[in-house]
Amino acid sequence: MFVVTTNGQDTVRLKKLLDHHKIDGVILGNTHRNDPFARLLKSRDFPFVTIGSMDDESIVQVDHDNKGACRDLTSILLSRRMKRIAYMGQKGDLIVNEERYEGYLQAYEDAGLKADMTIVYRNNMTELITRRNADALLKE
């Protein structure tokens, strides 16, 4: 078993493994919109599964309901009269991040409330940024 980390959407390392017949199958740990890894594997008719959802029903996917889970968790806090619930995540093309954010917003909508967008942080791309955002929340 190989564990190969990728850099963003660069398929060079995966292509090398495929070209040299070093692997028999692939588990994709993250899924992106228009995922280049899935496209590459599918174009070569190479066996793979994804951990995460994709728009392509022909791809084997193992996932859980990220949107529903975040909606439910946020709803629980709202039902306990906590109205200012911060959201810390990322935006971009990772499907899991978008689904979680949608669930967070859906919980507020279901409760007839509006989320306080001043405490929504969707730029947590690095540990340093995440720490700065957490510090800003604590100061507020």
Image (cartoon, helix red, strand yellow):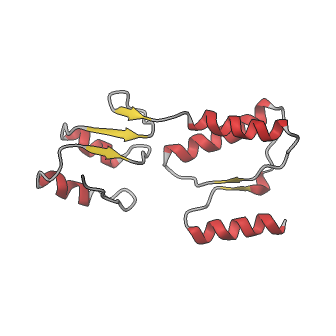
Location of residue 65 in the rendering, given as x and y in whole percent from the top left corner: 55, 33
- Which of these two is toward me, 125 or 93? 125
Q: Residue at x 49, y 49 (%)?
A: 93
Most extreme residue toward the right, as rendered? Answer: 81
Q: Where is residue 34 in the image (x, y as percent from the top left)?
A: 39, 43
Q: Nearer the viewer, residue 82 or 117?
A: 82
Residue farthest front in this picture: 1
Pick whichever, 134 or 119, lies toward us.
134
Q: Which residue lies furthest to the left in this view?
A: 20
Residue 102, x across and y down, in percent: 64, 39
55 vs 96, left or right, is left
Q: Where is residue 35 in the image (x, y as percent from the top left)?
A: 37, 45
For the C terminus, the image quarter is: bottom right
Quarter-wise, where is residue 16 in the image? bottom left
Q: In which quarter of the image is residue 139?
A: bottom right
Relative to 54, is 110 on the left or the right?
Answer: right
Q: Nearer the viewer, residue 72 or 104?
A: 72
Q: What residue is rendered at 79% in x and 41% in y?
A: 77
- The residue drawn where x is 27% and y is 45% is 26
Q: Is the residue 71 above or below the residue 3 in the image?
A: above
Number of numbered labels in the structure image:
0
Q: In which quarter of the image is residue 123?
A: bottom right
- What residue is rendered at 62% in x and 54% in y? 89
